[in-house]
Image: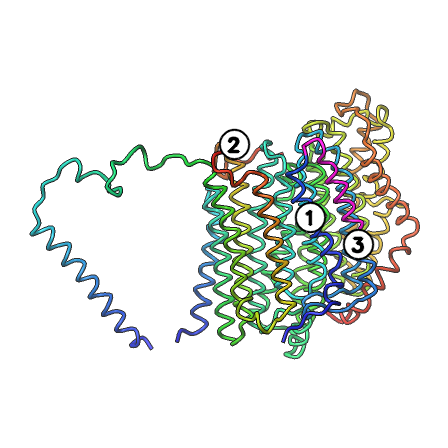
Amino acid sequence: MITVQASDFIRILPQEILSAFAILVMVFEPFLPSSRKVVLGWFSLLGVVAAGAAAVRTSYSLGPAFNASIAADPFSIYFIALFLLVAALCLLGSFNYLQRDNINHGEFYALILMGTVGMCFMAASTELIMIFLGLEISSLSTYVLAGFKRHDGLSNEASLKYFLLGSFATAFFLYGIAFVYGLTGTTNLMTLSERLSRTGTGGTPLLWVAIVLMFIGLGFKVSTAPFHVWTPDVYQGAPAPVTAFLSVGPKAAAFAVILRIFLGAFHAVGSVSFQMLWLSAILTMVVGNLAALWQSNVKRLLAYSAIAHAGYVLVGIAAGSAEGVSAVLFYLTVYALMNVGAFILIAPIAGTGERALRVEDYTGLGYTRPGVAACLTVFMLSLGGIPTTAGFLGKFYLFRAAIHAHLIGLVIVAVLTSVVSVYYYLRLVVVMYMREGQPQATSEPLPLALRVALATSVIGIFVLGLFPLLLKKKGEAEASPRHTKLAQVR
Amino acid sequence: MLEAYLPVLVHFLVVLALGLIILGLSAWVGVKRPSPEKLAPYECGMPPVGDARERFSISFYLVGMLFILFDVEVAFLFPWAVVYKSLKWPGFLEMFLYIAILLAGYLYIWKKGALDWSR
Amino acid sequence: MVPVSHVLALSVILFGLGAAGFIVRRNIITIFMCIELMLNAVNLAFIAFSRYLGDPDGQIFVFFVIVVAAAEAAMGLAIIIAVQRNRQTLSIDDLDSMKL
């Protein structure tokens, strides 16, 4: 018998509050004149803050909810906090952009909130069907967001490609779920893990097929090679604040699902998952970093860099240890700060209609707009993994975990490709500071909301780069109770 | 195993034969006096106007999409109705909330003018 | 009584057809229909497993999949209409304005 208790609702309080705000934004939207739509943006930001407060409340009453289909545990609270941070930064970065590019519709804010709800459910669900629903809620919102410039051909194309390949991937993920259900008779991750470890290690070929199908589906979402082909086009065509959102949010959420499924539920058949993760990590790092070398469009360059970063995260996941998981959690936060920062900064540089997007357009930016160039430099250095930035420590923890798990080959590839990546990140910096010329980039002053978002990212990168233990300790606490048995995966 | 399907096969053959016999008989026995009216495509007794591949108004697609959404969402009412009694008040409140969310969506499309047919 | 393996074979064939069609076909609407075919193959598998296991959960999952597929269909058609309005084409080969 299914019973519903009040505690169930407290354990999904952040999601409830976000949903309520999203629905209110949708209902208010038609009543506001188009000059006042930004009110809805601030209202959505209030919703994100309220959800943050709710997450704090939820963290005091942890436990399973709704018939063990959702878990409010430190792991999910960590990810929810991360998603709320990403949503807040993207909202702050989008206010001015929407007005400038004449797509000032309130639905934008509602879709950001709904996407965040979906991602929160992905991280918090311990039931495959709930994970699927979370995945779809976040995907459907982001498909529309990618095409939010309705009258722009590139944005349409991005949206269509994202939609077609995303749904294709979802079908694979779902087919994997169907097979897991058929083979084990359950879709609950705890029950699944118990049943699989009881029937012995290795699993049947059909179960391997199911695991591979699910990995294909999630691989698309985190854009690992060879499932990354959509990423550059979508990131280029989508409006820049949306790209910021999709390059971090759905990716981190899918990584949360990968951690829960492949290291949690399927740890009894860890060897299959491990080989898949290992191969995918190598391919992703090599393909992402090498392709980024040839890009002349800044958004495409950052898209390939985002692919490469998914590869680094896979290294930590392949390590399979509690140390690896905590490194992944730390890295995802760092990655969120630097990637969101870079993309929301590109929007004002590119100007109305996002015209100045080539690397050459940044020529001399270091002299005409020193503040903007300095911020972008920080993000590039952090993405490249230069010491004193958080990007360096994030990579360091990931690779250290992999070394402790004796994945020497993987670490060698990771370090070599990281070195290659420094070239293309620094190319942008060199163009900004060391080339003479008049930048094509516009010189409108940055709006206040964007400044706040950028300052948060930059300060976050330095704080985490210099005092990583502030977050790392938390990450370890989050990783340990759930994943201690994962150390024996292999 | 397969024998169980023998009646289906017999049925299929009988139906096929019957269809062929009727068509063959009418072609053989029937009188053919074609006229322009008889050769025109049948359209409920009205004279056909224009091309069949005419472009529809975009509102058709919009209303179609909205119909799919609201139609399918309501499908959840059926399993809910089966266990409604054992769910008691919490079940009722949850469905109330569900309908309220659908209502918010309805309000949105109404105010946006998606239901305004003449637009 | 049809054994579960037959139904699963049909489901695998449908899924394979959908996946192959997704890659081979060039018309956006057809590609989209291939995705729907794949989702229906999943539904068939859920139903087959549900019957095989004697567990009604599988049928409930099908409900969720149908609803999600409907939402996806509405969204997909909306996106396709937007593309058609701006580009006057429904062929996936014409949508290549972002190659380097």
Mark 2 is surrounded, within 10 Å at the Cα level, by few (under 14), some (14 to 19) or many (20 or more) other residues, namely some
Mark 1 is surrounded, within 10 Å at the Cα level, by few (under 14), some (14 to 19) or many (20 or more) other residues, namely many
Subunit ID for the residue under disc 2: C
Subunit ID for the residue under disc 3: A
Q: How many marks?
A: 3
- The answer to whether the residues at label 3 and label 1 have Cβ atoms under 8 Å apart is no
Which segment did they paint magenta?
Answer: A33-51
Which dot, 1 or 2, sits closer to the camera?
1
Q: Which residue is labeled 2 in the image?
A: C87
Please state if A292 lies on the left or on the right of C80 as rendered: right
Residue located 42% across and 36% down the image: B56
Residue located 16% across and 58% down the image: B20
Q: CA distance from mark 3 to mark 2?
A: 40 Å
Looking at the image, tell me whether mark 3 or mark 1 is earlier in sequence order: 1
- The answer to whether the residues at label 3 and label 2 have Cβ atoms under 8 Å apart is no
Q: Position of residue A17 (x, y in %)?
A: 74, 54
Residue most toward the right? A467
Q: CA distance from mark 1 to mark 2?
A: 32 Å
In the image, A19 versus A384, the foreground residue is A19
Q: Is residue A204 visible?
A: yes
In the image, A101 versus B112, the foreground residue is B112
Which dot, 3 or 1, sits closer to the camera?
1
Residue type at mark 2: give it.
Answer: Arg
Q: Which residue is labeled 3 in the image?
A: A81
Q: Secondary structure at mark 3?
A: helix
In the image, is residue A423 above or below residue C54? above
Subunit ID for the residue under disc 1: A
Q: Position of residue C25 (x, y in %)?
A: 45, 45
Q: Which residue is labeled 1 in the image?
A: A22
Q: Secondary structure at mark 2?
A: helix
Q: Quadrant of residue A337?
A: top right
